[in-house]
Amino acid sequence: MKGAASQPDLFQWAAELKQEQERVRSVNEERASRRGFVIFATDPTIDPELPAYRDVYATEAASPAQAIAKVRPLTGDRRLRAYLATGTHSDQLATAQWVP
């Protein structure tokens, strides 16, 4: 009978596993809603060598499309490209204009 007492309770283990899965899901959803993006706004009518050719913005959004939608009112007819802030353009964050 001593061995039976040391066996794990499978129902309790399954409940703990389900609770942990819910916790991980909620943490991942929260992270996804707070992703940072760097958005480049370029004006094709301006010479690329001029400083006014490109403006850089930074914001948080759930997707690149939402990030662009937040920046669009500030940029007029410029072309917009959004990149994750943790990617290859992370060095641009220091000079980017923050868009809440």
Image: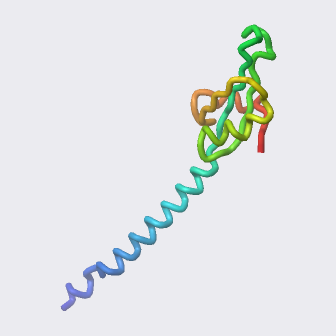
Colour scheme of the rendered structure: rainbow
> In the depicted view, which residue is nearer to us: 66 or 31?
66
Residue in view at x 76 percent, y 24 percent: 55
Q: Position of residue 63 (x, y in %)?
A: 59, 43
Q: How many marks?
A: 0
> In the depicted view, which residue is nearer to us: 65 or 83?
65
Position of the N terminus, as image quadrant, is: bottom left
Relative to 86, 2 lies left or right: left
Relative to 59, 9 lies left or right: left
Q: Position of residue 76 (x, y in %)?
A: 78, 28
Residue in view at x 68 percent, y 31 percent: 39
The vertical placement of 36 against 88, above or below, is below
| The quadrant where residue 53 appears | top right
> In the depicted view, which residue is nearer to us: 96 or 79?
79
The vertical placement of 3 against 76, above or below, is below
Residue in view at x 63 percent, y 32 percent: 82
User: In the orientation shown, which residue stands out farthest toward the bottom?
Assistant: 1
Residue in view at x 26 percent, y 83 percent: 6
| The quadrant where residue 83 appears | top right
| The quadrant where residue 95 appears | top right
Q: Position of residue 93 (x, y in %)?
A: 71, 32
Position of the C terminus, as image quadrant, is: top right
The vertical placement of 8 against 2, above or below, is above
User: In the orientation shown, which residue stands out farthest toward the front?
Assistant: 77
Q: Position of residue 51 (x, y in %)?
A: 80, 14
